[in-house]
Structure formats: C-alpha cells, structure tokens
Amino acid sequence: MAVDIAVIPVAGRGTRLLPVAKSQPKEMLPVGRKPVVQYVVEELARCGVGRVLFVTGPGKTAIENHFDTDAELIAHLRETGKEDLLEELAYEWANIEYYYTRQRQQLGLGHAVLCAQGVVGQQPFVVALGDSIIGLHAQSRVVRLMVDQFEETGADAVIALEEVPAEEVVRYGIAVPRGGAAQVFELADIIEKPAVGEVDSTLAVAARYVFSPRIFDCLHQTKPGKNGEIQLTDAIRMLVQQGRKVLGVRLAEGQTRFDIGNFQSYFEAFVDFALADPHCGEALREHLCHRLETTDQG
Ligand code: G1P
C-alpha cells in the first residue's frame, strides 16, 4: 500500500522555548520567511505525501489558521493593488488535505502518535516531528528514500538517523546498528535518551519515521518511560525485540537537521536560513561580518 499520509505531532508545550512559545506554538516560530511547520509540510509534499494529520493540543489553533485559505486577506491584497504578494500565499493551494485531531492529555510523543490511530487506521504512515526542518529550505528527500526502503523491504519501521557528538546522546533516541552502519541498515536496538557511555552508538533519531500500523499495537502496550512519558522510541524497541524488521537511514552527507526545540539550535537555524535568503542574505552576511569584526576589535 502506498504511503501518502503523514502525522505531525504538534501538541508539545515547548517549555524549552519559554517565554516565546507561551502563547504561540513553537511550530509557528519564523525561520527566515516561513514558520517551521510550513517547511515540514513542504518537505513532505515534495516526498509524495498527500494527506497531513496534525496531532494538536491547547494553544495550537494558529497552525490550523496558517494552513487555511484566508479569503479576506486575498481580497484585501487584490483591492489594495498588492497582487504580487499573493504568491506568498501559494502554499495554501498546495495539493494537500489537512486533518486535525487532539491529544487531550500530554502523555508523551508515543501517546501523541497513538492519537492518530483513529484516522490512520490500517495504513502505513510517516511521522514528522513539527519542530525539525531537514536540510536548508527543507530540500531533503530523506522521507522519499525511507518510504522506498519501507515498500521494498517490508520493514515495520524506517527511521532517519544522524551522527551526534557523544555528549549529546542524552537528548535523543539512539539507534544501535546490527553489524556495520551503512547508509541503510537494520537496527539491533534503540534507546530513548541514554546516559553518556550507556550505548556504543552516536546515531540519533532525526525526527522522521515511517511505520506500518503494527506500531500502534506496540504503543498500546508501552508503559511510561523517560520523564514518565509514553515514548515512541520504546514502542520501536518493542518492534525490534519482537524480531520485526526496523531499518535506519542516515541523513545524506552535508544534510543538516534544524532543531527548533531549543534556543541555541533555533538561533542557528534562523541565521542559516536568513543568510540563504535570496533578497536579504547578502546584506545580512555583510552586516554579520561587520558586527564580528567590530566585536573582535572591541
Ligand atoms: C524526540 C524523540 C527522540 C528524538 C528527538 C529528535 O525527543 O523522543 O527520540 O531523537 O525527538 O527527533 P524530544 O526532542 O521531543 O525530547
């Protein structure tokens, strides 16, 4: 069965981004000219996804408004002779169907994915975390590659992975390859946020997954894990322990995952996207160089 639906969990409170994420969803923070979640949807659309299901929570209606067609704004732009700005709203007409469901209790990422079961049913599906952009301007094709692997191999899960520095394993799900870790490989184990030195791997889960509906059976049986939350990683581990095929796919060389979940990586993402902006990038580069020179002297 072709994979054409993606689940984007966006219910998390974004406490690592307070106060900026207090009254607006962290997924709506700007990175260059667009909010984070628009890049996520554009990346998925480029990879063949035609339906997107957001798992939302309190305070997330700005996401629904962003993907709606705003007839009043369109009429206003026409009436005021600003037709040229209409192309900024072209994404509203993308060939994507949007669905929304609500995670009514904040019980963790695994629980958020379980909330999608009623809509997803017995289909395979993609999970894309709404606070991560893969590749500059979301040009990544990794989800396409993952779906192809999923369809060719009959795996029950395919997970995007990236190398992280050894001291950062505490922030991620960490995958242990079976045998050597080529670009695509089978997983022997996966552990959510291990302590430094607890596992002999630095391959971190990079916010994109493809699953067969079997993951729902595992999620139903998953007990609260790290931070008392129902962890998606623990359900994937259950698949591995049941002897199911779980594959890892490395992000392509030079492909960055921009994580908007904390201030440092958010600032880095903003600067990278702003520097790559076709209209303002060059001027910003000059400004930054000037700033850095004067700071060095001072
Ligand atoms: C989640 C997952 C973790 C993954 C990370 C980045 O953690 O639980 O396995 O590595 O996203 O994709 P969070 O950042 O929500 O704490």
Image (cartoon, helix red, strand yellow):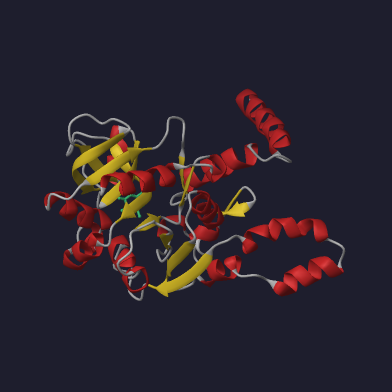
Measuring 27% from the left and 35% from the top, which residue is drawn there? 202
**Quarter residue 232 falls in:** bottom left
Residue 20 can be seen, yes or no: no
Q: Is residue 67 above or below residue 188?
A: below
Residue 285: x and y in percent read 67, 32
Residue at the outermost top position: 297
**143 or 285, which is in the foreground?**
143
Residue 235: x and y in percent read 21, 57
Left or right side of 291 for 130: left
Residue 266: x and y in percent read 50, 47
Residue 259: x and y in percent read 45, 47
**269 or 84, which is in the foreground?**
84
**204 or 240, which is in the foreground?**
240
Measuring 44% from the left and 66% from the top, which residue is drawn there? 53
Residue 127 can be seen, yes or no: yes
Q: Which image quarter holds the C terminus?
A: top right
Measuring 64% from the left and 23% from the top, which residue is drawn there? 297
Q: Which image quarter holds the N terminus?
A: bottom left
Left or right side of 233 for 23: right
Measuring 24% from the left and 41% from the top, which residue is drawn there? 175
Left or right side of 215 for 120: right
* Number of numbered markers: 0
Left or right side of 215 for 128: right
Residue at the outermost left position: 242
